[in-house]
Image (cartoon, helix red, strand yellow):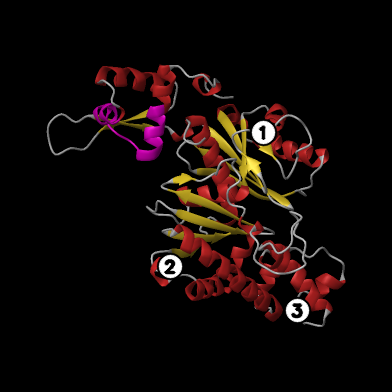
Amino acid sequence: MQHKFFESEIESKVDLTRKNIIRFYVVNGSSTIAELAKELDLSVPTTTKLIGELIDDGFVQDFGKQETGGGRRPNLYGLNPDSGYFVGVDVKRFRVNIALVNFKGETVKFEEGIPYRLENTPEALNQLCDIISNFIEDQEKLMTKIHCVGVNITGRVNTTSGYSYSYFYFEEKPLSELIEERIGVRTFIDNDSRSMAYGEYVSGVAKGEKSMIFVNISWGIGIGIVMDGKLYYGKSGFSGEFGHTYVFDNEIICHCGKKGCLETEASGLAIHRIFLERVRNGSNTILHSKIESDDALLLEDIINATLEEDVLSIEIIEEIGNKLGRSISGLINLFNPELLVVGGTVSRAGDYILLPIKSAIKKYSLNLVNNDTEIKLSKLGEKAGAVGAGLLARERVLGFSS
């Protein structure tokens, strides 16, 4: 499904130069041949020849004469957005979101809330592969232009090796290879918080910032770190496990097996647990009927109740926001980022979660440091993970990311 110079791990010098041209257009937009030749340190005849080949292959378009103040007007060339597509798969606890992204990074299609239950079983992996395959097959004519699939998954993920150590680690082959064999398209995997961070950095609220921290508050807590315009992975690709920092002196066992983790008292799991505890102890809520009917109470239900001004839900969300803000203040002191973005399922509560976070940051972080950090809610919302995974798939095919 991918072009010949995307297929091989061993690149010829010419193929690498072609990729560099496409990278240039992805980052900078259209340009003249002279501008491109200067930027890539190529001769004009060589650049002209390569541009001609990329036009023949459908990757580059000739946009005609450039407007100038006088003299001979050069032609403007740029990326053909429909020359290739990338699929981003965001695997959540009870659903899957999938995005189709074109070569310019624009979201062409987005499917949200595909029913799925994330469990560490071969059956759950088979179902995930079926969901991805069905989405690809539904693209019909575009299907042959899909170059790569990026899959997000929560927990410890080594993107370079393709192994996921938190889910689907029951075969010798890396998870990326298992999925690739079943869906028939080159596949990469990454941690969900990192992909969300990248999606937000490229297509969301980030505008010109070079350093950003994305805080993913869902059932668990993770962060994605952008430093100097690049995602930070750490030595083994496990950076961002913010939720498993020791914060609380409690006896609550985290799903990582340890006690006192931030996640035990300041995550979606904590919101869900505390909510049910308080209802059992007599607190009133608009969700009583759902709980009494034995329907599975989801985190989304509590967020929706918050937005409907349910007092119990608001109270718990604010408490969680305050606890999170204290720990986030430490991140700001350590990294001094230009931008901190709050995303994930809990961020849908809007100011109910954002204001207590900001208040705690102001109280617990250094004023000289936090004055330079802008704090915003995610712009992409539910799309962040899937769009980020699609964008990262594009970057890896082009050699942007390790």
Q: How many marks?
A: 3
When asked about the image quadrant of residue 44, the answer is: top left
- Residue 60 seen in the figure: no
- Quarter of the image with the N terminus is top right
Instruction: Locate residue 125 relative to residue 105 in the image: left or right.
Output: right
Q: Earlier in the sequence, mark 1 or mark 2?
A: 1
Magenta region includes residue 108 = no
Q: Amino acid at mark 1?
A: Ser
Q: Amino acid at mark 2?
A: Asn
- Viewer-nearest residue: 126 or 104: 126
Q: What mark, if any, has residue 176 been given in the picture?
A: 1
Q: What secondary structure is marked by label 1?
A: helix
Q: What secondary structure is marked by label 3?
A: loop
- Viewer-nearest residue: 222 or 143: 222
Q: Amino acid at mark 3?
A: Thr
Task: Check whether the beta carbons of the residues at disc 1 and disc 3 lie within 8 A of each other.
Answer: no
Crowding around mark 2 (Cα neighbors within 10 Å: few <14, some 14 to 19, many 20+) is: some
Instruction: Locate residue 193 relative to residue 198 in the image: left or right.
Output: right
Q: What secondary structure is marked by label 2?
A: helix
* Residue assigned mark 2: 370
In the rendered image, residue 219, in percent from the top left (x then y), is placed at 69, 59
**Camera-side mark, 1 or 3:** 1
In the rendered image, residue 132, in percent from the top left (x then y), is placed at 69, 38
Residue 327 higher or lower than 3, as above or below: below
In the rendered image, residue 157, in percent from the top left (x then y), is placed at 65, 42
Crowding around mark 1 (Cα neighbors within 10 Å: few <14, some 14 to 19, many 20+) is: many
